Amino acid sequence: MAKPIDMSFDTKVIHAGEPDSKIEGAVSIPIFQSSTFEYAGQTDYNELKYIRLNNTPNHIALHKKLAALEGAEKALVTSSGMSAITTALLTFLKSGDHLLAHNTLYGGTADYVKHDLPKYGIEVDFFNAGNPGDWASKVQPNTKVIYVETITNPLIDVLALDEVVTLAKAHGLISMIDNTFASPVLFSPIQFGFDISLHSATKYLNGHTDIVAGAIIGNEPHMAKITSTLNHLGGSLDPHACYLMHRGMKTLSIRMERQCKNAMAIAKFLDGHPKVTSVNFPGLESNPSHEHAKAFLCGFGAMVSFEVEGGVAEADMVMGRLQYPICTASLGGVESLVTRPVQTSHSLLNDEELSKAGISKSLIRYSVGIESGDDLITDLKQALEG
Ligand SMILES: *Cc1c(COP(=O)(O)O)cnc(C)c1O
């Protein structure tokens, strides 16, 4: 019997993209650890079966699953999130072009666009995410790409995503969005009107803190151009890592459901605690991003950041007393993680850049895992009151 066409998201996570006929009957797709495959009469270089060309059965299954999840025509997996981001940017920008990006990007992306792109003669300007009126004035005749993130790091803001799409369409810009923090569960960029969706699959997509991977999702003909750039730059994902990512993605829906629920409970707890001076979580009605999150996303995500009385010294004490979350960078895994972003993800930003972005040195970022929400809150309580 043919598979029903209208699969819901939760069903796509399991069934979309799986090989049409099971390979030797295998329910879980086997790992094709072969760098090259027998020549089968291909006429296009990109069709030759070779790991760097991202077209082994492990790649193809993942590409189809990812495209189905975000309602797009095509997807590619890459060797890391940064590989997805740099490959996408280098596909659409050349010497003499101008990139417009919002001002609180992931640290690695911010550093790349500020310090590496200018070496290729590409100009970059940043806009204040909170002030859409300011964006249009920064578009120049040579602006080619506008770049944003669905949920910003580490302040967990959701900007006016509709205005980004409108601006891009009005000026003929390629719109790119880093959808890592939302994951396909909360937001489908291509359906919303963005051209290119990017992921660090290291985070929620894989979800198990055991590989580094990335993804680029979009429609033809953009994806054909990106495929060619990726095949030249060589940021391909090894089939074994493809397999782990594929396995991890099957639980994406249920992981996100639990993580979002835990994050909401934790944000409410922190919001009501006398030692906590501020909480950043768009699920709180008082949060400035609440309306945007409600309008654009299917949930509020599982990242929370907050500050405690007593500055950096006290923030470090609280983090040191936490029993469950492991203190490190990265996010989106089944286990809770905490970090002070200025020490890790944002350590490349100088003092002026930090203050411009509104990131305090004492800010604690909490990536909420799938543990018992009650246990995580009990732990936070003892750490704050210790
Ligand atoms: C981690 C991260 C990246 C970089 O991804 P890697 O897989 O580490 O290369 C990019 N964007 C966001 C939002 C991230 O959290």
Image (cartoon, grey):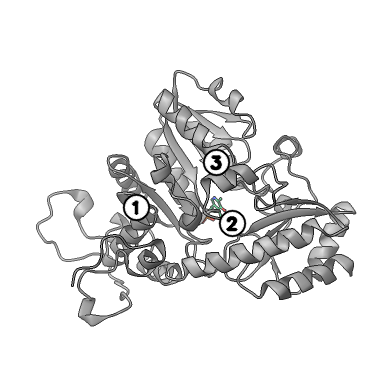
The reply, left or right, for residue 164 in relation to residue 23 is right
Q: Earlier in the sequence, mark 3 or mark 2?
A: 3
Q: Mark 1 is on which residue type? A: Ala
Q: Label 1 neighbourhood size at 10 Å, few (<14), some (14-19), many (20+)?
A: many
The residue singled out by tag 2 in the image is 301
Q: Quadrant of the N terminus?
A: bottom left
The reply, left or right, for residue 367 in relation to residue 68 is right
Toward which corner of the image does residue 87 lie, by quadrant? top left
Q: Mark 3 is on which residue type? A: Tyr
Q: Which label sits in the foreground, 3 or 1?
A: 1
Measuring from the top left, give residue 355's x and y in whole percent.
75, 37
Q: Is the residue 235 above or below the residue 111 in the image? A: below
The residue singled out by tag 3 in the image is 112
Task: Determine whether the residue tagged by mark 3 lies in a helix, strand or loop.
Answer: helix
Measuring from the top left, give residue 105's x and y in whole percent.
59, 42
The residue singled out by tag 1 in the image is 75
Q: Is the residue 146 above or below the residue 17 in the image? A: above
In this view, the residue in front, 100 or 13, is 13
Residue 254 in sight in this render: yes
